[in-house]
Amino acid sequence: MSRDQLPPGWPAAVRPPGTPEWERTAVAWLLELVPPDYRAYEVLRKYPVLLARFAADHVGAGLESARGGWRTLRAELADTLPPEAIEAAMSAYEREGSRLAEAQRGVRLVAAALVGHRWVPRL
């Protein structure tokens, strides 16, 4: 599979399924999404599908946290912080939410590929 045949949202750092060392690049990318302490668990390196599950959980929790922060920031800190700090924080939540949503899609795609699912473009 070539890069132009990959589904939208496929992580740039992960080689296409079926190419040499694609699983190695998937594991490396997934490890970047989880806390560094997860590298100590050999089971996650041995079973990339399990690592993808851990990454999905971690990224999903981060995305929910960013969304919750974005929803409640103004109400909780408007009397404490200057307006420019609130706006900068809202912008940071938006960027982080976008980054995490993109990572979440990538994790789903990589996890599916790890269990043998192949993407077929629709016409």
Image (cartoon, helix red, strand yellow):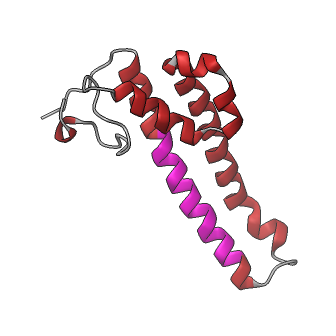
- Can you give x and y, in whole percent of width and height, for residue 50 in the image? 56, 19
Magenta stretch: includes residue 99: yes
Which picture quadrant has residue 32? top right
Question: What is the magenta segment's predominant secondary structure?
Answer: helix
| Residue at 55% across, 22% down | 45
Q: Quadrant of the N terminus?
A: top left
| Residue at 68% across, 27% down | 40
Check the image and report above or below for 28 versus 102. above
- Can you give x and y, in whole percent of width and height, for residue 65 in the image? 70, 48
Q: Quadrant of the C terminus?
A: top left
| Residue at 48% across, 35% down | 28
Magenta stretch: includes residue 51: no
Q: Residue furthest left?
A: 123
- Can you give x and y, in whole percent of width and height, for residue 86 in the image? 72, 76
| Residue at 61% across, 46% down | 63
Q: Residue furthest right?
A: 80
Check the image and report above or below for 71 versus 82. above
Give the mark count.
0
Q: Is residue 74 left or right of residue 61?
A: right
Highlighted magenta segment, given as a residue range: 86-104
- Can you give x and y, in whole percent of width and height, for residue 92 in the image? 62, 67
Which picture quadrant has residue 31? top right
Check the image and report above or below for 99 versus 46. below
